[in-house]
Image (spheres, rainbow, N blue to C red):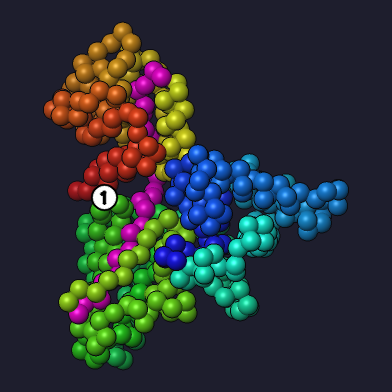
Amino acid sequence: MADEGTFGEELRRALNHLHEPEILRTSPLVRWLALEAEEDCARALRIALEQAIEAFRPASDPGPDSREWRRYEVLSGRYVQGRTQESVAGRLGITPRHLRREQAMALQALAGYLRLLYDLPVAPDGGPAHEINPGSQGNVEINREMLWLADSLRDGTSEVEPALREAMDLVQALAQQRAISLSLSCSSAIPLAGAPQTVLRQIVLNLVTAAIRNLSPGGRVRLFAQVEAEGIAIIVTASPCSQPTWECLKTVDTAAEMSRRLVELFEGKLVLSELGGILVARVILPLAGRRVIVLAIEDNTDTLQLWRRYLQGTLFTLVEETDPQQALIRAAALHPDLIILDVMLPNIDGWALLRRLRSDPSTASTPIVVCTVLPQKELALSLGASDFIQKPATGREFRAVLDRQIVAAARP
């Protein structure tokens, strides 16, 4: 199996996005639960997970303090109903920290139930490349800590450059012992990363220490950070390497592997490669920070509902304006970070509205994305649009355009 993460991690990710078909459709669980043949595999996966959670509902009333009832309430409340940890903890009369322990155990129980229900081996298809051995108590604890991190700190953010400098300071002594030189370079005005400061620092620490161990005296480790279309890129290079390969670092007990797991818990990705004797570790983390206000000038309520679903659980907050006559007034009062404009509007020329938005001082520099069924990308860009989406668009396409504009706006 490819590097798709452990069964437990993919289960947690699918549950956190239970009502987002675009994410469920690409989940490895679709294949592991043999749902590929379903006409709507995302819906089939959602139903399968909801039914599995419902199977934990006690047949009789065992009392609110029973383990069975708490386990069901945690799974149903957090994932099916989408309530916050604080809300579920309050309902159960326990602290958020206690809830995290209950939640980790409930997720393990649900994973075990699904494996039995679908007759899966301990690891599906022979096991993902990095599946933890469940027989090891130490690894069970690591898994539990990972799940706590992802669920309790999933909204955490970090300043990139300070986190990288802290990591470099911590490994300085180790590098000196091995006669390895270190350097750090960050592009200016890097926005907040979508991972907590302690997690980002640990990701970098793991990769840098792994690189140092693979170098001979006189080697060099370089660390770069920059904003890219996919998010924030953090790149570690190590050279010259006596063994120019990451393969020896990719087993489950290595620092590099732990970084991979941490990155993926916070919806990022890690790619390890070798280029001419130089080891390269490339981390991509999503952007985070304050909420991004998106003003949608669109009269079709079905379209607006679709967009709301696309942006659920992201950093974007959709503000709707269905009356195009009020669009200029609304935009001037709201000062949105981004405007989505449909040019097929009733009683008004959408192209003329685009030009008015561009000429108005309050919206002249605001990114405007034209979203229409018309194949008029060149026209939209020539009239001042920052980007273009042709309907119908998938959630991934829709979010990619918005992410691209926010990244572009963050650059100096």
When the figure is inspected, residue 25 is found, relative to residue 190, above or below; the finding is above
Disc 1 secondary structure class: loop
Q: Quadrant of residue 50?
A: top right
Residue 143 in the magenta stretch? The answer is no
Q: Nearer the viewer, residue 108 or 209?
A: 108
Quarter the N terminus occupies: bottom left
Please tell me which residue lies in front, 325 or 342: 342
Name the residue located 25 percent from the left edge and 53 percent from the top edge: 228
As drawn, 350 above or below 246: above
Residue 349, picture quadrant:
top left
Residue positioned 23% across, 34% down in the render: 387
- Is 286 magenta? The answer is yes
Q: Is residue 178 visible?
A: yes
Seen at 31% across and 70% down, the residue is 272
In the picture, measured across the screen, residue 368 lies left or right of residue 57, that is left
Residue 279 position, x and y percent, is: 25, 76
Q: Nearer the viewer, residue 289 or 136?
A: 136
What's drawn in magenta, residue-wise? 277-300
Residue beneath disc 1: 229
Residue beneath the point at 19% across and 29% down: 377
- Amino acid type of the residue that numbered disc 1 sits on in the rendered structure: Ala
Residue 310 in the image: state x and y as whole percent.
43, 37
Q: Give whichever of 244, 101 is nearer the camera.
A: 244
Give residue 298's position: percent from left, percent from top: 37, 21
The x, y position of residue 101, in whole percent, is: 66, 63
